[in-house]
Image (tube, rainbow, N blue to C red):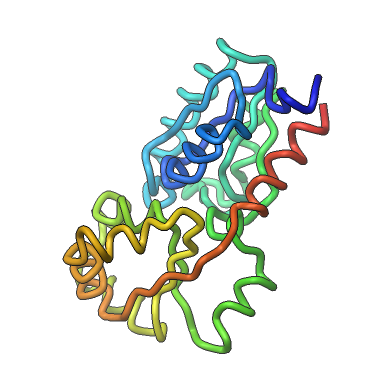
Amino acid sequence: MSSHSLFEGYTILSCGTLRPELDYLKGEGFLDADRVLYTAPGLHETPLELEKQLTRQLVNAKKHSQEIIVVYGSRCFVDSVNPLRSIDDLIRGQAERAHRIQAANCIDMLADATQRESISSGKKVYWLSPGWLLYWKQIFREWDIGLANETFPQNDMALVLDGLGVFDEYSQNAPERILEFSDWMKIPIEPAKVSLQRLRGLLSQLAAIS
């Protein structure tokens, strides 16, 4: 496999929350996979639907490639019936040649714990990615205002780990969308510029193991 086609023979299967980043990496020529497939954003809130969509897309991915990279974190799936059953158990049950990215969640894929500690500067932060900003109404559709009030105001702010300039684009062209989300969370939302180098590295590690 040449360095110019690192992901040849692979299908990438990701949570739709990371579509902005993966679409960018695909557009710049880095993510030259056979296919890039997505589940709906934010299915960690509905584990049964996550399992349904992930299973369906794993079956779909096997039709396109022998090797599959799954862009989901270790904490993105909790089986309410059997809490000991992990997302890796779910994946292995459907595709033996599927390998999951080594991160806890999508936030961890953009900035590791050390980076986040540095960015937060001691403040208590609710972390977001551009996908959370784009799809928040879908991700939090099951939440009522009581749960939102219990969860978000415990933090000093929300920070968007933005390697794409999405926050700046929203600020210029649709600031009311940020304000609506901020009002619902009852905390300010600010950008934290990051590179996509960690995500590139995590994906490359998996492409290099076969």
Q: Residue at 21% of width from left, 66% of height from top? A: 175
Determine which quarter of the picture holds residue 167.
bottom left
Q: Residue at 57% of width from left, 12% of height from top? A: 64
**Looking at the picture, does residue 143 appear above or below residue 201?**
below
Determine which quarter of the picture holds residue 62.
top right
Residue 61 pos. (x, y %): 55, 19
The quadrant of the picture occupied by the C terminus is top right
Residue 160 pos. (x, y %): 43, 66
* Residue closer to the observer: 170 or 207: 170
* Residue closer to the observer: 133 or 193: 193
Determine which quarter of the picture holds residue 153.
bottom left
Q: Residue at 26% of width from left, 80% of height from top? A: 186
The reply, left or right, for residue 100 in relation to residue 192 is: right
The reply, left or right, for residue 105 in relation to residue 9 is: left
The quadrant of the picture occupied by the N terminus is top right
Q: Residue at 47% of width from left, 37% of height from top? A: 23
Q: Which residue lies furthest to the bottom in this view?
A: 122
**Looking at the picture, does residue 56 appear above or below residue 127?**
above
| Figure disc tally | 0
Residue 198 pos. (x, y %): 67, 54
Residue 184 pos. (x, y %): 21, 71
**Looking at the picture, does residue 65 appear above or below residue 5?**
above
